[in-house]
Image (cartoon, rainbow, N blue to C red):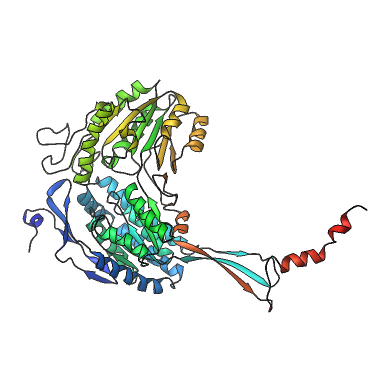
Amino acid sequence: MQSKAQSAGLPHTLVAYNFVGGKEISAGEAVLHRKNPANRNDLVTLAPESGLTDVQKACEAARVGFARWSRTPAPQRAAVLTRLARLLSEAKEPLARFCSREIGKPIREARGSVQEAIDTAEFFQSEGRRLYGQTVPSELANKELFTYRRPLGVVGVITAGNFPIAVPSWKIIPALLCGNSVVWKPSEDAPGTATLFLELFRRAGLPDGVLNVVHGRGAGGAGEHLIAMIEAGHVDKISFTGSTAVGRQIGAAAGRALQVPSLELGGKNPLVILADADLDLAIEGALWASFGTAGQRCTSAGNIIVDRHVMPSVRSALARRASELKLGDPLDESVSYGPLINERFLERWIVQRATGLEDGAELLLDGRRVSPGQEPPGFAGDAENGLYATPRIFDRVRMNMRIAQEECFGPTVNLVEVDGIDQALAAANGTPYGLSSAIYTRDAGAMLRFKEEIRAGMTSINNSTTGAEAHLPFGGNGWSGNGTRESGIWVLDAYTRWQAVNVDLSGKLQKAQIDGADASLQAAPSFAELLPR
């Protein structure tokens, strides 16, 4: 039977499946329909809507898979990642194109997302020979001390749709390398991309039960059920990327189970432009930080904080350059950004306009949803069937306004005027979030102060708030996360526990701090002998 997309001459619809214990499980009556946000007539993916029983079975299969996988030597586990990196490289272009179609990410950015997964696999394949413990000197004779990294068990992974390949790779790849098994609930916005990524893991030789996938929604669906598995004793660790509100729920459930979740949450990221900045470079960075991926990144710039001496120049240049951005089909290599990922983001972005005006902000650039007959110059998309929106810039924003404090996924940014580095730092630290940050300046002293005093987990000097590398820690503080980090060697602590082992070869019971202390006292003169007479 043909899908509507096929019968209309559109690309084929991908039929996703749950993957549990090495078996493909097709959808029953409950089915998710994922449509192309650039053309809502294009049905991209059909996926199962998983229930509580589906999630529980996946966790049980992961427990069985863990028993075998955790005993596999780490270099052998890493060999799977070597093959995965090669397969990702071979599939980079078709995978990127499918990602563009499913979530509306511009093709150049989609390729970058796949490359991030390749980089992550290549980085952690080498870590398979470096999951080091330590040898520690003992205070007692004929005794050896060691430390070992041990896997945690079953890891639940819940990911967002804006980076449906890169972010899952940050979580799944190191979790597997460390010897854990995984139950992954991908975003309902990208079930097809998740299925293609899963296929590459399978072809790389990952054993059955080690990576299990359950599709579905978050609230009231597979995501909520996977969180419930923490207190049910079926999940030993949750790694989540998404909203701060859901992160709090996960943190509460994990806390009751005395677990430490990995939480990568929202952001209201500051980008500071001081009076001595290279303004051309700063505007370029601000545009990319604000409107790349249509502003749908957790690291997107939320507040552009500008010294009053250069605010007129920044205001003029930013409005002009933003109005010239090309919107349209994400598969068009020339577009600056494509559609919003889903109607939910678009609706919240529309509401934000009214919120800003109610607070007293002014519209320097009035972003609106693109509709037929109201297309901006150079528009190259489907205005009737796509979820497109033009750039919005709020001006004369104060830090106590809601729009300066609340995250909004969409092409919107605020201009905040300050006088000097002290006010800039106060504004940059003036939200409860602490994910990413950036400053543009030529002043080395200002660079140093910003690095030392900003409360964000990541900071760029003369660069955008967005962007990540596979070997650098990624994560935030405050409402942006609980201090855990993705990527690089730092993420290994999130997916392993330390075990201390002592081996006593003396043939007798030796008591630390007692026998050792007695021996040292016997070898030393008594304290009384040292006193004057």
- Looking at the image, residue 318 lies above or below residue 298: above
At horizontal 26% and vertical 60% (from top left) the residue drawn is 222
Q: Quadrant for residue 95, please give it.
A: bottom left
Where residue 296 sits: x, y (%)? 28, 43
Residue farthest bottom in this picture: 507
- Looking at the image, residue 300 lies above or below residue 515: above
At horizontal 40% and vertical 74% (from top left) the residue drawn is 68
At horizontal 35% and vertical 57% (from top left) the residue drawn is 169
Where residue 532 sits: x, y (%)? 91, 52
Q: Quadrant for residue 202, please give it.
A: bottom left
* Viewer-closest of 472 and 64: 64
- Taking the image as shown, residue 186 lies to the left or right of residue 440, namely left
Task: Please tell me how many numbered marks the rendered image carries.
Answer: 0
Where residue 520 sits: x, y (%)? 77, 64
Q: Quadrant for residue 137, please give it.
A: bottom right
Q: Is residue 276 at least partly visible in the picture?
A: yes
- Taking the image as shown, residue 103 lies to the left or right of residue 271, namely left
In which quadrant of the rendered image does the N terminus lie? bottom left
Where residue 337 sits: x, y (%)? 24, 40
Q: Is residue 334 at least partly visible in the picture?
A: no
